Amino acid sequence: MSSKTRRAVLWISAPVVAFAIVGGFLNRVTAREETYQHLKIFDDVVGLITSNYVEKVDMDKVMDGAMSGLADSLDPDSAFLSPAEVKQLEGGGALPAGDVGIDLTRQYYLRVIAARDGSPAANAGLRTGDYVRAINDTPTRDMSVFQGMRLLRGAPGSKIKLTVFRGNSNDPHLVELTRDAVSGPDVTGRIAAPGVGYVRVAAIGPKTADQVKAQVADLTKAGASALIVDVRRTSGGAPDGGLAIARLFVGSGTLALKDTKGIGRETIAARSGDGSIALPTDVLIDTGTSGAAELFAAALAGNKRAGLVGEHTIGRAGQQKLIKLPDGSGLWLTTTRYFMPGGTSLHEQGLEPSVAVEEPAVEFGQPAPSADPVLDKALARVAAQKKAA
């Protein structure tokens, strides 16, 4: 390896070392030795590539790929950011108002966690679990969730094309969506059966807890003596928003545990005045239940305040922050994760339903079935509980 290349490798190795420190690999002597051993192998690999590869090596491209691979190996939300992406993030400017209403994770390609009720994506039939193989003809195989979510944004009225695969099908579906300022009520409600109030939480924001409280008050006046809260396909939102809703239902006990790198584990507990909603409650969950909605459901289930009906959730309960690197690039790194009240990790583990019910499969392009077996099961469960009381 030439001295120039070695200097480049050493320069690149500095952020890799920083990455290892942030990731927690150097918190013990043995781990530190193992990390430096891997860095030595990394140095050797770079030398072999530059000495033996048939064409002249673009070192910037190789190193960016290596950094992206390091971040991708952690969890779907962590990412390596280019200097341009770091500047965009640090600029603090709002993203374009136009959106298609989907939240993404990563599993080989970008994959839909959930489509917001009434959004362009939901209206086009996109569902939880769909693979987005390309965005505007750009393959997502090497695209981070961070990049994909930003590519989806644009001016309201502008169009975007997604290449979508569903299930095990090898047939691609080209979907053209028109970006819109995705809106609509976060919370709606109705009487679903005699004495049973149904509350749909479509999204979680700073005011959602107040909206849930108001909706439950209206349903109680209408005769509801039990509640079903539906957080299926509810993704995103700040963790505090989900915990704020949980405080309405849980009067005492631990709501969640929060573990932040460099700070340690903190207990988030109910406070005086919490638990104003006392009606018996079940919560509907599915594989599209993510983030703040998962924290809400976990808090109720962990305190035996509600049963969970539906499917296992995705396990996306972490928070990311930007860590800058010397060359202007950066790491969008998960530095906080949440645990269930009993101490089991929620992040990357998810919630197991009390009563498992699968959502019906839908062929691409076909309308969603009118029957809702998850809601029907919850209604039957409430009726049985009332009869036994």
Image (cartoon, rainbow, N blue to C red):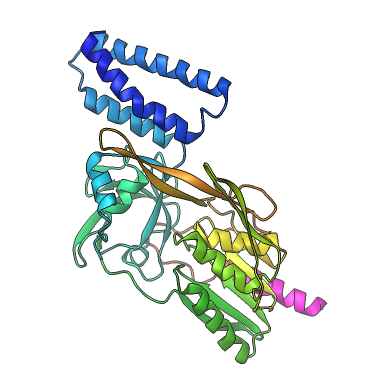
At horizontal 70% and vertical 53% (from top left) the residue drawn is: 342
Vertical side of 325 occupied by 241: above or below: below
Give coordinates of residue 285: x percent, y percent.
57, 62
For this rendering, which residue is in front, 333 or 263? Answer: 263
| Quarter-of-image position of residue 352 | bottom right
Residue 383 falls inside the magenta stretch:
yes
Residue projecting furthest to the front: 263
Give coordinates of residue 97: x percent, y percent.
25, 65
Q: Which residues are magenta?
A: 376-389
Question: Magenta: predominant secondary structure element?
Answer: helix
Lateral position of residue 51 relative to residue 168, left or right: left
Vertical side of 18 occupied by 251: above or below: below
Lateral position of residue 139 relative to residue 278, left or right: left
At horizontal 53% and vertical 77% (from top left) the residue drawn is: 212
Give coordinates of residue 44: x percent, y percent.
36, 12
Residue 69 falls inside the magenta stretch:
no
